[in-house]
Image (tube, rainbow, N blue to C red):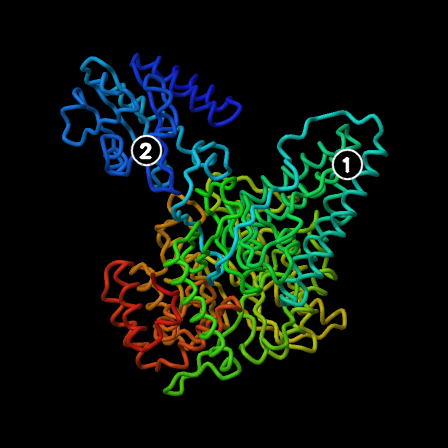
Amino acid sequence: MLEVLRRIIQEVNGARNLDAALATMVRRIRKAMRTDVCSFYLFDHAIDRLVLMETIGLRAQAVGRVSLEVGEGLVGLVAKREEPLNLEDAQAHPQFRYFEATGEERYSSFLGVPIIHQRRMLGVLVVQQSEKRRFDEEDEAFLVTMAAQLAGVLAHALATGGLNRPSIPGGQARFTGVAASPGMAIGEAVVIAAPADLNSVPDLIPTDVEYEIARLKEAIGRVRDEIRAAGERLASRISAQELALFDVYQQMLSEAALSQEVEKRIREGQWAPGALADVVRRHVQYLERVDDNYLRERAADVRDLGRRVLAHLQEETPQTPEVYPDSTILVGDEISVAMLGEVPRDKLAGLVSVRGSSTSHVAIVARAMGIPTVLGMVDLPLPRLGGNRVVLDGHRGRLFVRPSPELESHYQSLIDEERALMAVLEQEQDLPSRTPDGHDMPLMVNTGLAVDAVASLKSRIGGVGLYRTEVPFMITERFPGEQEQTRLYRDQLESFAPLPVVMRTLDIGGDKDLPYFPIEEANPFLGWRGIRVTLDHPEVLMVQLRAMLRASQGLDNLQVLLPMVTNVDEVDDALRLLDRAILELGEEGVAVKRPKVGVMLEVPATLYQLDALAARADFFSVGSNDLTQYLLAVDRNNPRVAELYDANHPAVLAAMARLGEDSRRLAMPTSVCGEMAGDPAGALLLMGMGFTTLSMNAPSLPRVRAAIRRVSLASARELVEETLRLDSPHAVRQHLETRLGEWQLAHLLPPKD
């Protein structure tokens, strides 16, 4: 049976489209199981019903016409229970429902199994037989295995529109994804397609190498012009930090990066489109393996640039609308920053994408522009969305298609309330983040791009709590030199002077390697990464430390942060290198002060070595995202387990509370720079636990500041005591909502249904 299963899967995967694959599948399963009927029912989220999509044995005219609710009939029962149903006499079952259009009254036995992908029920696979037959364990196991194999293929086809589903007009439909940028919008869906397909480029040997190189350069030049124009259109709406994303695009397109690699591939015997596709695919595959959310999402940028260049090489133009409607909700399989820049600034109301996460470039820009965004919406039927009226909820990650008048009216009132709230919060953003009982809670920002020179931000923050230094290492083909790094760090330090800027040393390794410094490991999460890598390569760390020190000359606002520390020896070794760098620069006539050095607490082992670490470091910085991930043994980027990642988990809160206590005992300044700090309720908990600084993305500042200014330190401490007595994440969330409601701060949380 295993060989039969393997052959069926090969035929299904080799079908020209999913409709053909489904037809092949039901026929092969019927033959393999020696039954009279095999049928596939799709759960259509647009209508919340199971629809007969393919059958062999039932009447063909029933396909697309027969539908039933979850829980209705035997098929609906399988979907509701999400478990197999095996019956010798189906018609005797109290749940049996007869559909005249199918002609299934002739069949007695029934075996149905659910098709489930990442806890989401996609449909039901059914076999039936005329005589009474109890399908044995091997039959049931075979069908369950087929359903599991089909689940991934089906989920992808639904997301990309690869399955032609019957269009049932009217009615409200709801889809869910990852909330990437808060806010709500009502408008018209505009579906945008990728400009070219990198996976369908044939290999061809060039007849004229120089001609291929010339047309490559011309295509890259055109894309550079497009990116520049898109950046100029957005220049007045976003800060220098987000605008720097377009500089990153330009650097990717520079002679030293994409162009040079593709040209080399052409000279090796590949025509321009094929060489481009080879290089882009290699970079994308590398980037998609990395552990860091922010860096992994660069794969989308590389893929988008590759498609744009390929479109020009193929003498095609990107498929963008000529006219955008007012309140455009831009929808696509994968939306890039450049696509965002093509929409007139006064038309764009929201973004929806099948791919992507909250750390993607487009999510960063969307948050800076205040555009509601939902990404990772894998169930989205793209071909059916264009031109539909939609409501987008960026707080909960929802999209409503063809909303009812009542729902649209409800959301319009929520939008009006949110605008009024932000107007009120804006008026107090230059006021100190001080509690009613006089406790100052400094707020800082996280940055990760080139420069954030927003002058208005300086009066509202206490500095930069985390500056990622990985980006310049990612966009080159070699380790950047000391002068290159010095210029970049100097820009950052000058932009915020005299406020402190905490620069994390290079955090690579494991599956977050570099194209020119690959690392292959079986378990990258527990592997060679962070300070472990840079201490093993002191020549890399020394150049970075020297560049940081040079950049700080005369400003003295640099603070250095060591990532992924596990034991005190690592700190000792890093401090020796820092002292050596200071000594070397002094011998070269560059006098610099020794900066404060901090340890990043993200490995659980550090929680049990705080006394020893405090004797060596000047401050601690808690990476609450990674600490949560390690404490719960959950990869939050893995969709199979992402729901288990929860900063409200009692174990996480207990660890954070203990850490806060120990930091106070040691009189050690300790900041938190994860997502927990940017949440109003989380910020109040952290303040009550005794942390001295909170660092967050800039858009989170207004709500967090408002919460701190309205809740006393004493009340925050009580909140911590109450919360630590709870035993589930759900109970914690409910309690936090209740308490913020009592303090009349519920408006700072995402609006409720």
Query: Which residue shows up at 70% across the image and 55% down it?
Result: 480
- Count residues near mark 2 (Cα–Cα under 10 Å), then give few for <14, some for 14-19, many for 20+: many
| Nearer the observer, 636 or 198 | 198
Q: What residue type is labelled 1?
A: Lys
Q: Is mark 2 on a helix, strand or loop?
A: strand
Q: Which residue occupies 25% across, 23% down?
A: 111
Q: In which quarter of the image is the C terminus?
A: bottom left
Compare residues 381 and 232 and report the one nearer the observer.
381
What residue do we see at 49% from left, 48% from top? 388
**Residue 662 visible in rendering:** no
Counting from the top left corner in percent of width and height, residue 148 is at 36, 30
Which label's residue is closer to the chain start, 2 or 1?
Answer: 2
Above or below, 729 relative to 206: below
Residue 585: percent from left, percent from top: 71, 68
In the image, residue 42 sits, relative to residue 8, either above or below, namely below
- Label 1: which secondary element: helix
In the picture, measured across the screen, residue 144 lies left or right of residue 276, that is: left
Task: Answer yes or no: is residue 276 visible.
Answer: yes
Q: Distance between the residues labelled 2 and 1?
A: 56 Å
Amino acid under label 2? Ser
Quickly name the residue at label 1: 264
Rendered position, 702 above or below 112: below
Question: Tag on residue 67?
Answer: 2
Count the marks.
2
Q: Where is residue 432 in the image (x, y as percent from the top left)?
A: 48, 83
